[in-house]
Image (tube, rainbow, N blue to C red):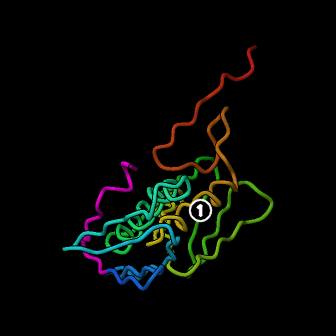
């Protein structure tokens, strides 16, 4: 039995609607929807969501914990939301927000623009800290990874875009 899959999910501030293999989670921050594979059933009992697999086939076992984690992330997202914080390290590296567009100046010959998809917002603090906020954990994480990929931190001076709290392993420079 999947240790993750058999844990019940507590409904914090969210409500859940299940229509066959389609689940809709609504909360104060918005609404998320997802299709559930046929081998997995989701039920709601006294403010807890239970994820149950149909049989012990290899595919059902592999989907059990996955579906439970996805549903738990949906509940957490509509209740509290997700935030990824990125830091720009380098002389002249800065970010700015205009409407729903994030503009990065990170030492390239041109500024790099990111348009926020539906449900995502950007916040810039002191021109060097960018916060990506939203209710969909997957979307927030992917967008933050795409922003970081513009200028990954380099190991000699540590310049680049890094996650807050990320430790950059430094290399020694050229010996004289």
Looking at the image, residue 156 sits to the left or right of residue 36; the answer is right
Q: Quadrant of the C terminus?
A: top right
Task: Quadrant for residue 30, please give it.
Answer: bottom left
Q: Which residue is drawn at 49% across and 73% down?
A: 36
Q: Which residue is drawn at 68% across and 56% down?
A: 106
Q: Depth check: 86 or 56 in front?
A: 56
Position of 158 relative to 148 (above/below): above
Where does the image place residue 71, in percent across and percent down from the top left?
41, 68
Task: Quadrant for residue 49, please give it.
Answer: bottom left
Q: Depth check: 123 or 144 in front?
A: 144
Per the rendered image, the range of residues in magenta is: 1-15
Q: Residues within 10 Å of mark 1 (few under 14, many from 20)?
A: few
Looking at the image, residue 106 sits to the left or right of residue 118; the answer is right
Quick check: is 7 in the magenta stretch?
yes
Quick check: is 6 in the magenta stretch?
yes
Where does the image place residue 38, in percent across and percent down from the top left?
52, 72
Name the element at disc 1: helix
Residue marked by disc 1:
142
Q: Which residue is drawn at 53% across and 65% down?
A: 138
Position of 96 relative to 14 (above/below): above
Residue at the extreme right of the image, as rendered: 109
Residue at the extreme left of the image, as rendered: 46
- Identify the main secondary structure in magenta: loop
């Amino acid at each position: 039995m999947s240790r993750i899959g058999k844990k019940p999910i507590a409904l914090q501030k969210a409500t859940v609607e299940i229509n066959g293999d389609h689940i809709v989670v609504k909360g104060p921050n918005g609404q998320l929807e997802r299709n559930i594979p046929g081998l997995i059933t989701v039920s709601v009992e006294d403010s807890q969501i239970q994820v149950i697999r149909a049989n012990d086939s290899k595919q059902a076992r592999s989907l059990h914990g996955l579906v439970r984690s996805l549903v738990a992330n949906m509940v957490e997202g509509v209740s509290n939301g997700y935030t990824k914080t990125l830091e720009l390290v380098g002389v002249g590296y800065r970010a700015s927000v205009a409407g729903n567009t994030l503009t990065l100046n990170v030492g390239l010959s041109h500024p790099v623009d990111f348009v926020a998809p539906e449900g995502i917002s950007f916040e810039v603090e002191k021109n060097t800290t960018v916060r990506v906020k939203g209710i969909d954990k997957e979307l927030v994480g992917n967008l933050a990874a795409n922003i970081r990929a513009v200028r990954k931190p380099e190991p000699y001076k540590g310049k680049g875009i890094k996650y807050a709290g990320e430790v950059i392993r430094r290399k020694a420079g050229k010996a004289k």
